[in-house]
Amino acid sequence: MDIKGLDYNTKREALIMPEYGREIQKMVEHGIALPSKEERQRCAQTIVKQMENRVPQMRENANYKQTLWDHLYLMSHKQLDIDWPFDMSNAEKLYAKPEPMKLPQNTIRLRHYGRMVEELLEKLKTMPEGPQRNELIRLTANQMKRDLVQWGHGSIDDEKVADDMARLTDGAVQLDLKSFHFERVVLDDAPATGKKNNKKRK
């Protein structure tokens, strides 16, 4: 219902900086229309003080004063003719949208192991024998076991890990399950046992 004489927000011009409110925006428009530069300068300084009072948490930033002037510059649509106390050339970058991140295009052969494990297995293919390689094998095998437990609904199969390591490293890594000891896997989010409390209520 449209009531004559009422000013609806939906019919007003959208605010550039909603956090400062429409009153500040009107002050900016008033400052732009002032005839002399001296008046506009005084008006701009008053507006910045009001902006600071309206958003006091801005003071937590080291360069908050320049940020306030940057915001005033944007709210004025760059039409406020004054002597700006800061360089305004970077003001528009405040609201510049970042470039979208590129998603990895390479497919993961075994999703339950993930990209990190695949990269570790690839490294193990060409890594020379030695303590560092042995340690990387230990870390990778235990990570694979944790992944299997998580994605296998709690099932643990050491032979599955050994088989996957051999296959995914083209035979370069052969776990001896008689001598290799896996770390104990503890599930923090283990499902409840489902047992009901059979105690009778009094």
Image (cartoon, rainbow, N blue to C red):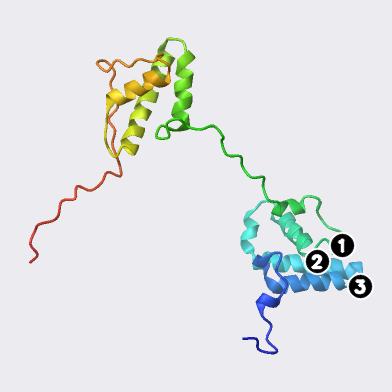
Q: CA separation, marks 1 and 3?
A: 12 Å
The residue tagged 1 is 82
Image vertical order of residue 21 relative to residue 62, above or below: below
Pick whichever of labels 2 and 1 is earlier in the sequence: 2
Tag of residue 44: 2
Kindly indicate whether the residue at mark 3 contacts the one at mark 2 (C-beta within 8 angstroms).
no
Kindly indicate whether the residue at mark 1 contacts the one at mark 2 (C-beta within 8 angstroms).
yes
Give percent across and percent down for residue 73.
79, 60
| Secondary structure type for disc 1 | loop
Residue 182 appears in the picture as rendered: no
Q: Amino acid at mark 3?
A: Pro
- Camera-near label (2 vs 3) is 3
Q: Amino acid at mark 1?
A: Ile
Left or right of 72? Residue 117 is: left
Q: CA separation, marks 2 and 1?
A: 8 Å
* Foreground residue among 63 and 114: 114
> Residue sitting at 83 percent across and 71 percent down?
31
> Residue sitting at 27 percent across and 30 percent down?
184
Give percent across and percent down for residue 99.
67, 45
The residue tagged 3 is 35
For disc 2, the neighbor class at 10 Å (few under 14, some 14 to 19, many from 20) is: many
Left or right of 115? Residue 33 is: right
Say which quadrant the N terminus sits in.
Answer: bottom right
Pick whichever of labels 2 and 3 is earlier in the sequence: 3
Residue 189 appears in the picture as rendered: yes
Give percent across and percent down for residue 37.
90, 67
